[in-house]
Image (tube, rainbow, N blue to C red):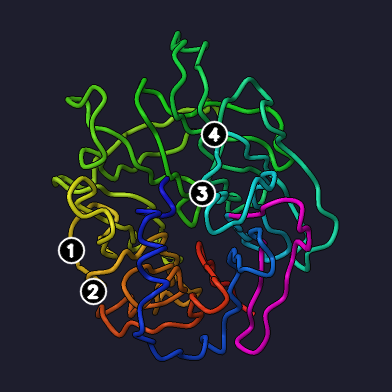
């Protein structure tokens, strides 16, 4: 669930002289992402069609972050947190403690608060996503699980109805569950968790899992571990065809600023490094045609920019929105069909 690998790197990258060329956005997609700059002083949700940016939230008293668009492209979810200070020093995009889940129409109209801070007794919430059928929302919440007798607060996976009501904890083990994402048919979920032999674990112990989602019992079935390495695996995302899962990996304890984009088949086989450029590349998301993966990137010469790479053969990194000027930071992009 870490959107940014190391905040100290922001200071380092702002002073680099290297400038990467900016490539046009795919003419078949529109990007949704969050952005802050010195003028805004807060994070806001934007859309970008390759020609112009549009501020979708327009509220300079709050931060809005983590935009996720519905499968029918009619609405988007995001989190709202109160402004505390300049966005470049406040880390508001990771403020899970104060996060409130919002929903907007795709044009930014009709904002609604659907899960306020503290609702359901949750201490934190994050990474919400619409289900493919448009009837549910999947997310992570820092909460207890009295139904299963787990009274400790832990990151767990939760499904609600489309209005944020009727929450069901679907994760079954009393361990950290993070970064959940739906399969294209809504019948499976991919996520990050700890293996059974890791009681608490460090970041590098976390692996990618998938499981069947049982809608009638609100539980995961047939949990399957897809990765087995000494790397921090995070932010998995299913391809639209259902054939692949992309995610990020990092040797978090040693080099947290260096994370790669990886692609595997849904059984964990055919592992391929799509991008290893020595920078921190995270939160991958597939284009509708599955030909490219978009993500945010951070490193020397690239300050929280939005980029993409070839999702079939790997490589071919292109910067589409370059951060740095006027303290601009971009992150968590989602490409959608125009």
CA gap, disc 3 and disc 2: 33 Å
In the rendered view, would you say 200 is above or below 234? above
Give the residue pinned by disc 1: 270
Report the mark closest to the observer, 2 or 1: 2
Q: Crowding at label 3, few (<14), some or many (≥20) Cα neighbours within 10 Å? A: some
The residue that mark 4 highlights is 215
Front: mark 3 or 2: 2
> How far is the residue under mark 4 from the one under mark 3?
10 Å
Q: Tag 3 or tag 4, which sits nearer the N-term?
A: 3
Pinpoint residue 62: horizontal percent, then vertical percent: 72, 50
- Residue 184 location in percent, x, y? 48, 57
How far is the residue under mark 2 from the one under mark 1? 20 Å
Question: Considering the numbered disc 4 on the image, is that residue within a helix, a strand or a loop?
Answer: loop
Q: In terms of secondary structure, where does tag 1 sit?
A: loop
Name the residue beneath numbered marker 2: 277
* Crowd rating for badge 2 (residues with CA inside 10 Å; few <14, some 14–19, many 20+): some
Q: Quadrant of residue 27?
A: bottom right
Look at the image and give the residue range highlighted in magenta: 44-65
Residue 304: numbered disc: none
Residue 295 higher or lower than 179, as above or below:
below
List x then y, in percent, for residue 32. 60, 69
Which quarter shows the C terminus?
bottom right
First reached walking from the N terminus: tag 1 or tag 3: 3
Nearest to N terminus: mark 4 or mark 1: 4
* x, y percent for residue 217: 52, 25
Write the residue at 34% across / 63% down.
243
- Mark sitting on residue 186: 3
**What kind of element bears circle 3?**
loop
Q: Residue at x 42, y 45 (%)?
A: 1
Distance of mark 4 from mark 1, alpha carbons?
A: 30 Å
Between label 1 and label 3, give the one nearer the viewer. 1
Q: Residue at 68%, 58% (x, y): give it.
A: 76
């Amino acid at each position: 669930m870490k959107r940014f690998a190391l905040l100290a790197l922001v200071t380092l990258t702002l002073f680099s002289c290297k400038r990467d060329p900016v490539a046009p956005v795919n003419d078949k997609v529109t990007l949704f992402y969050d952005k802050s700059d010195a003028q805004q002083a807060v994070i806001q949700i934007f859309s970008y069609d390759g020609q112009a940016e549009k501020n979708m939230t327009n509220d300079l008293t709050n931060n809005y972050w983590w935009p996720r668009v519905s499968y029918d492209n009619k609405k988007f979810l995001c989190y709202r947190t109160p402004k505390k200070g300049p966005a470049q020093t406040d880390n508001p995009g990771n403020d899970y403690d104060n996060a409130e889940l919002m929903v907007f129409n795709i044009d930014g109209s009709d904002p609604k608060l659907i899960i306020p801070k503290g609702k359901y007794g949750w201490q934190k919430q994050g990474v919400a996503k619409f289900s493919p059928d448009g009837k549910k929302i999947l997310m992570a919440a820092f909460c207890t699980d009295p139904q299963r007798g787990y009274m400790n607060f832990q990151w767990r996976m939760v499904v609600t109805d489309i209005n944020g009501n009727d929450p069901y904890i679907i994760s079954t083990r009393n361990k950290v569950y993070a970064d959940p994402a739906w399969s294209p048919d809504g019948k499976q979920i991919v996520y990050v968790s700890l293996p059974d032999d890791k009681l608490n674990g460090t970041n590098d112990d976390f692996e990618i899992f998938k499981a069947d989602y049982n809608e009638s019992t609100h539980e995961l079935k047939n949990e399957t571990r897809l990765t087995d390495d000494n790397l921090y695996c995070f932010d998995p995302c299913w391809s639209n065809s259902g054939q692949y899962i992309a995610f990020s990996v990092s040797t978090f304890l040693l080099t947290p600023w260096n994370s790669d984009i990886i692609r595997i088949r849904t059984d964990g086989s055919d592992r391929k490094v799509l991008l290893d450029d020595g920078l921190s590349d995270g939160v991958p998301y597939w284009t509708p045609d599955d030909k490219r993966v978009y993500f945010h990137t951070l490193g020397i010469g690239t300050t929280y920019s939005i980029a993409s790479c070839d999702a079939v053969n790997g490589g071919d990194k292109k910067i589409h929105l370059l951060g740095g000027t006027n303290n601009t930071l971009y992150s968590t992009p989602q490409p959608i069909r125009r």
